[in-house]
Image: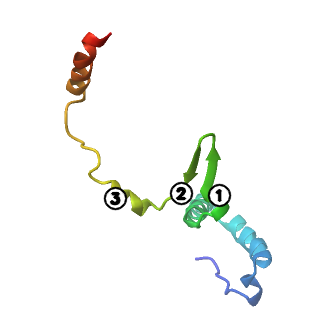
Amino acid sequence: MGKTTAPSADTDSSPAIRPELLRLLELLPPDKQREVLDFARFLHEQMPVPEAAREVAYPGAVLHAAPAGTLSALTGLVALDGDAVADTEALYDDNAGQH
């Protein structure tokens, strides 16, 4: 196993962390560097979204971010069973005489 270093007092601030992080990253083999990259991406995805980025304006609409937990309230609003072909045919059969 490689030598581990104890965190020093100066690693508590961002400017001091970066050089140490890069130094240690360079010492890792490429497959371990990919693991660190994957983990860093995971951590980045877990960060809260800043309020300014939550609302994105589009012509005629404003989108708001919502937590994934709100999706459970949508359960049961759409039926997953049925026959789409039969429903489509019925729709066109009902409107056939209106052309």
Provide residue 86's location: percent of width, then percent of height.
20, 24
Amino acid at dot 1: Ala
Q: Residues within 10 Å of mark 1 (few under 14, many from 20)?
A: few
Element on which disc 3 rests: helix
The answer to whether marks 3 and 2 mark residues whose Cβ atoms lie closer than 8 Å is no
Q: Is 50 above or below relative to 10?
A: above
What residue is rendered at 57% in x and 59% in y?
38
Q: Count how many numbered circles sit on residues in the image.
A: 3
Q: Is 15 above or below relative to 47?
A: below
Horizontally, is 98 left or right of 60 in the view? left
Q: Give the labeled residue for mark 3.
A: 73
Q: Residue furthest front?
A: 98
Q: CA distance from mark 3 to mark 1?
A: 24 Å
Label 3 vs 2, first from the N-terminus: 2
Q: Is 4 above or below relative to 41?
A: below
Horizontally, is 92 left or right of 23 in the view? left
Q: CA distance from mark 3 to mark 2?
A: 16 Å
The answer to whether marks 2 and 1 mark residues whose Cβ atoms lie closer than 8 Å is yes
Res. 40 mark: none
Q: CA distance from mark 2 to mark 1?
A: 9 Å
Provide residue 84's location: percent of width, then percent of height.
24, 29
Q: Give the labeled residue for mark 2.
A: 65
What residue is rendered at 58% in x and 77% in y?
1
Amino acid at dot 2: Ala
Horizontally, is 96 left or right of 55 in the view? left
Q: Give the labeled residue for mark 1.
A: 53
